Image (spheres, grey):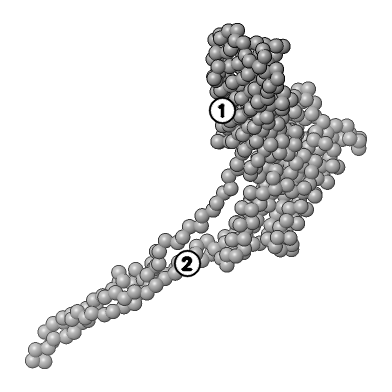
Amino acid sequence: MVLLLSYGAAARAQEISEVYVTSDTLRVYFRQDKTVLDPQFRDNGARLREFSRRFGELLSNPQSKVRSILIVSGASPEGSSTRNRYLSDNRAKVVYDYLTQNRLADPSRVEIESRGEDWRGLAARVRASDLPYKDDVLEILDLPEWITEGGKVVDSRKQRLMNLQGGKVWRELYDLYFADLRGTRVMIAYNVLKQTPRPVKTDTVTVYVDRPDTVYINTVNVDTVYIRETVNVSVSVPDITPQPQLQTKRERPFYLAVKTNLLYDAAVIPNIDAEIGIGRGFTVGGSYQNIWLRNGAYTKWYRVEGFEAGVNWYINKDKRPFRGHHIGLYGQMLTWDITIDGRGYLAERWTVGGGISYGYALAIGRRFNLDFEIGIGYLGGNMHEYIPQDGHRVWQSLEPFRWIGPTKVGVTLQWLIGRGNSNERRAER
């Protein structure tokens, strides 16, 4: 019976207590010198959607209660302090408007911390780094923002950083950290139940109770004996049925570029090219070009047809396709029939080859690049030489065609298609 009572006590729901929790739940970023919240910039849209989903679940959960919401905004330190204060204040306001207009936050519970130039954020990043000049930078960041003598400003933290090692350190800090300082964080403080009681169900078990009784013989108390009886008792049993897990779906970026080589277009050779990202900066693609013109009276031909396929690796820290330098491998099939200055040159069937390429994708718009590319490799086959005469070809020779050198050149206009496949200005990366 003692074991049964212990089991029943362990089966009771535990006492519930509240715990104060602070969570950094959202980070969004802004373009340089801008206060517009752009969903396409640095995956802001995906983070906002995920935040709205998670925050909505928090608000609908009866076991949690939001106490306060803190919006922390800032700006990178380049430019004037007055302008950076304006940017920081308005970036906080944009996020505040998003939360209140979408009914995610009670305005009375929202607090705003606008840092202006986010020196604290810069110091934290430098402190966590292994930069060779780390100690020098942290020493300057510990100085007052404005250094005065006799009531006059004679120097500043920013000016000393900009002069450190002739400006080299400032430029490196700009490239490494400033883009991350142009952001806003949302931190939510809320109460949550430490332990959630599980539903219980009742069950009936059979136990045995030994009831004492007395035996008399001729009115003399001989002994005390125990009579076993069966008793049914109801107990609470924890429900250990597994709870369904909420599955979240993340939207993966999709990178596709449709292209045309402007050099071929200038030579009146229609062409089309497509390239698709396959992960970690790698792409695969293929192209086709074809022109077939003929002046029948003089047997003058202008015919070019070709196929190309290859793989490219875009070299940048974000490992994103269609951005910056790239190297690649390619294969080609090409045929032609061209008349130049009264002589004709005809490839016998197809010439084949391949090589290595180097290029640079230059952003010229949000969804457009100019890609400058050159390839060095081998192209081989056979080529006829002839003279067009009286509507016929007068064959002159058939020689092997072997070429080692540039086999690919392009100034290509790229149209970027897909989720997350867009450009930002260099200063904003």
Res. 138 visible in picture: no
Q: Secondary structure at mark 1?
A: strand
Q: Position of residue 327 (x, y in %)?
A: 60, 24
Reading the image, the residue beneath label 1 is 309
**Side of 28 relative to 231 (left or right):** right
Left/right placement of residue 123 relative to residue 382 reads right
Residue 369: % across, % down:
71, 33
Above/below status of 144 relative to 243? above
Which residue is at the front of the view, 67 or 255?
255
Nearest to the eye among marks 1 and 2: give it.
1
Three-letter code, disc 2: Pro
> Which label number is shown at residue 197?
2
- Secondary structure found at label 2: loop
Q: Is residue 84 visible?
A: yes
Q: Quadrant of the N terminus?
A: bottom left
- Label 1: few (<14), some or many (≥20) within 10 Å? some
Q: Is residue 382 left or right of residue 222?
A: right
